[in-house]
Amino acid sequence: MGTTATMKPNRSKTMIGTLGLVYSAMFAALMMIGANITYFLPALSVSGVPITLQTFFAVLAGLLLGSRYGAVSMTVYMAIGLAGAPVFAKFSGGFGEIVSPLFGFILSFILVAYIAGKIVEKNSTVTGFVIAALVGCVINYLIGTNWMFAAYKLWAAAPDAFTYKIAWIWMLPPLPKDIILSVLAGVFGHRMARILRMRRSI
């Protein structure tokens, strides 16, 4: 009986670990779709500017998978893209993407998912989920925009009269969309987390 008692927790941890890896792979796939959503749904392009759902899925990964597996899923996504698979925006990929002015946004997704996951691990209310999603959005913009500015100034060809202020002005058009999607991710993530917990308890 002692042996059986010690095996049950291990089996439970193995199942949780396996599900975590499966969900991590699923979110890596969702990130590819989110990066190129306008290819599948051209109507989501506004005035020629494509609307991506990467921030939405990165936040959702942290909210539903937790800090550990959320970060793993985003790391897998980034690694697949750097390995050459066309999973980044405009179906791009390859190690050369690391010097792209926009690579900071991809890199930020790891921290976005991790921090969002950490917040909801301590506050699992709907308010906590929404706050976590908004914090994730802020992290995405901070890392992505600063990387873009540094890239243009240090190794990419900076446009004429390019300044730090202009870098942030460039980020204003997608900001309302990402704020709205972050709030939706928080509400949706909270409901999905409750459903997943109920199914695990059955």
Image: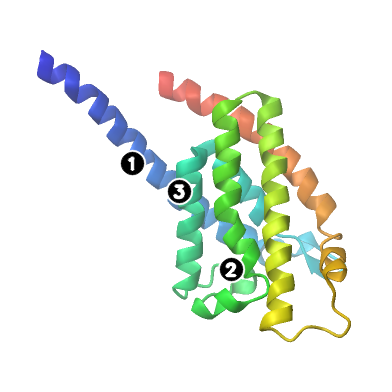
Describe residue 132's horizontal placement relative to residue 163 as left or right. left
Q: Amino acid at mark 3?
A: Ser
Residue positioned 49% across, 21% down in the render: 198
Q: Which mark is residue 88?
A: 2
Residue positioned 61% across, 49% down in the render: 112
Looking at the picture, tell me which residue is in the foreground, 89 or 166: 166
Q: Which residue is mark 3?
A: 24
Q: Judge the density around disc 2: few (<14), some (14-19), many (≥20) Cα neighbours within 10 Å.
A: many
Distance from disc 2 to disc 1, alpha carbons, whole Å, reads 26 Å
Looking at the picture, tell me which residue is in the foreground, 34 or 130: 130
> Where is 120 relative to 116, above or below?
above
Mark closer to the chain start, 3 or 1: 1
SS state under label 2: loop
Q: Judge the density around disc 1: few (<14), some (14-19), many (≥20) Cα neighbours within 10 Å.
A: few
Observer able to see residue 38: no
Q: Amino acid at mark 1?
A: Thr
- Give how far across and how far down residue 68 sits, in percent: 46, 43
Contact (CB < 8 A) between labels 2 and 3?
Answer: no
Q: Which residue is mark 1?
A: 18
Describe residue 17's horizontal placement relative to residue 105 as left or right. left
